[in-house]
Image (cartoon, helix red, strand yellow):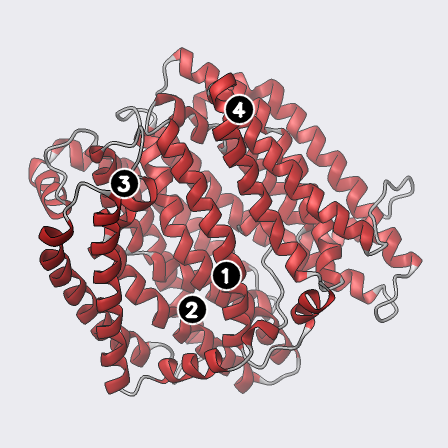
Amino acid sequence: MEKILRIFTKESGSINQAALLLGSLTLLSQILALFRDRSIAHFIGPSPSLDAYYAAFRVPDLIFICIASLASITVIIPFLIARMDGDKVTPEARKYLNDIFTVFFGLMVLVSLAAFFLMPRLISFIAPGFSPFYQEEVIMLSRIMLLSPILLGLSNLFGTVTQLFRKFFIYSLSPIFYNLGIIAGVIFLYPFFGIYGLGLGVVFGALMHFGVQAIASRSCGFMPKFSFSINFRDIKQAALISLPRTLGLTFNNIALISIIAMASFLKSGSISIFNLSLNLQSVPLNIIGISYAVAAFPSLAKSFGGGQKDEFKKYLKTAGRAIVFWSLPVIFLFIVLRAQIVRVILGSGSFSWNDTRLVAASLAIFSVSILAQGMIALLSRSYYAIGNTRRPLIVNLFSSVLIIILSYFLIYLFENVLLFRFFIESMLKVGDIPGTEVLMLPLAYSIGTILNFVLHWVSVKKDFMPEESFITKTFFQGLGASFFLGLTAYLCLNILSPVFGTTTFWGIFLQGFISGIMGIAAAVLVLYLLGNEELKNLAQALTSKFWRAKIIAPAQEEL
């Protein structure tokens, strides 16, 4: 065990190595998240009750994001390090963490209690289109889930200690246990308590998430405790630094609340369709975009702080091109193999073929913005690295408002312009099933996100690289290779469908898997012939001992 833990404290040789390690750890959590969604789809399926379950997350998530990000790891760790004597914990460092813990815990409990009593009034903003019965379900579920932001917030704070003492492996276990708790709620609690069993599963998962970090903190001998003489000056300093990032995350969450509110007026199951497809597209985003953005951030901050602007540009280019290199093939794969992906992961029990087609269509629309979402994570961090938090905040605010406006406009257009509706339904092959209005919500989200990326990219080009190529060459090489990937996968699907059939799990899995592998092989061949630099860097990183890379894991509010 000592050897296993030791590999997570080694220095990284490159951003690619750190990103591969972080991506590998994230992959474990995301696989479990897929099992979680499959369990939910199997036992419940898109329905008014599942809509209520997903809607109930909105207030607890908003509380968690608003408060937990104020005590973010990326903000607190530098303050703690400044108060420590090397790796030795000083009374000053202990006092600082205790002050943060006391204020943070008190604030989280007070806000959660206020939300508990205000839920009957808040429901008109969260799910105004629900019937009174399902609005009551959302109120009860939200009240149960209000325990989760308290537990997750404390886990995030205790995670500061595990990060400080480089317990990266232990830190990465928390999301896994969180998903296990939700799965337990679906399998064991749902049969007895109905939809409220899922809410109890979320709380149980949050408790295990917190328990892992609490045990790890205790083993480090640095357990946060209540403080009765708080230095509010230090608290204010940390909160002010965190505020722009907190507001950016809050704007995104408010946009999601607005989308859920609009979906509550659509056909029952629409909120479930939206969330299941959103979760699926988040898998490659977390593994690729977030991993490279997080891996690049320490190098960006260090190089800029040291006045090494050329190094700063180099790290930014490397991470940006890597995100483009990985994201474009994923976009084409998800669009071509969308039905196979959704059916294999979610298609069982209460999850019907019509549900599969709607989620697949929604996934295809979301997938178009995977590259944009990954680049936003990186480009916003390039501004955080230089201490400019205003630019990402303004862009995120504009993007969030645009997503809300587009959602209203596109739904109106879809319901009143038959030509537009026919075009969308024909392109995604969903014209013969009800409830297609929900597809306008991921479309609005993707358009707003892509514009967000464009604004970030234009700003970064202007501020950091006005006369240099950034991702252009990699983008066009990746686009060409991804086109051949999509074409090869599409042709293979048509060849293999009669061979394996479309009525069994293994038939759908094998045709999707083989088509995907053949498509990837075609893309790799094209990139090799083009002499793609990122392909060479990937080969080099894979042949090195990338699992020895030292990483700084993302804050839990981003997972």
- First along the sequence among labels 1 and 2: 1
**Which image quadrant for residue 390?**
bottom right
Q: Nearer the viewer, mark 3 or mark 2?
A: 3
Image position, residue 331 (x, y; %):
28, 60
| Residue in the picture at 33% in, 46% down | 445
Disc on res. 391: 1
Residue position marked by numbered label 3 in the rendering: 359
Provide the secondary structure element on which disc 1 rests. Answer: helix
Q: Tell me whether circle 4 and circle 1 mark residues in contact (CB < 8 Å).
A: no
Q: Which residue is mark 2?
A: 459
Question: Which comes before the other along the chain, label 4 or label 3?
Answer: 4
Marks 4 and 2, Cα distance to the nearest angstrom? 49 Å
Callout 1–callout 2 Cβ contact below 8 Å: yes
Disc 3 + disc 2, Cβ < 8 Å:
no
Which structural element holds mark 2? helix
3 and 1 marks in contact (CB < 8 Å):
no
Q: CA distance from mark 3 to mark 1?
A: 34 Å
Q: Nearer the viewer, mark 4 or mark 2?
A: 4
Could you give the CA–CA distance between mark 4 and mark 1, rounded to whole angstroms? 45 Å
Percent x, y of residue 481: 23, 74
- Circle 2: residue type: Ser
Front-most of residues 345 and 244? 345
Q: Earlier in the sequence, mark 3 or mark 2?
A: 3
Of marks 3 and 1, which one's residue comes earlier in the chain? Answer: 3
Q: Is residue 35 left or right of residue 13?
A: left
**Sequence-first disc among 4 and 1:** 4
Q: Are marks 4 and 3 in contact (CB under 8 Å)?
A: no
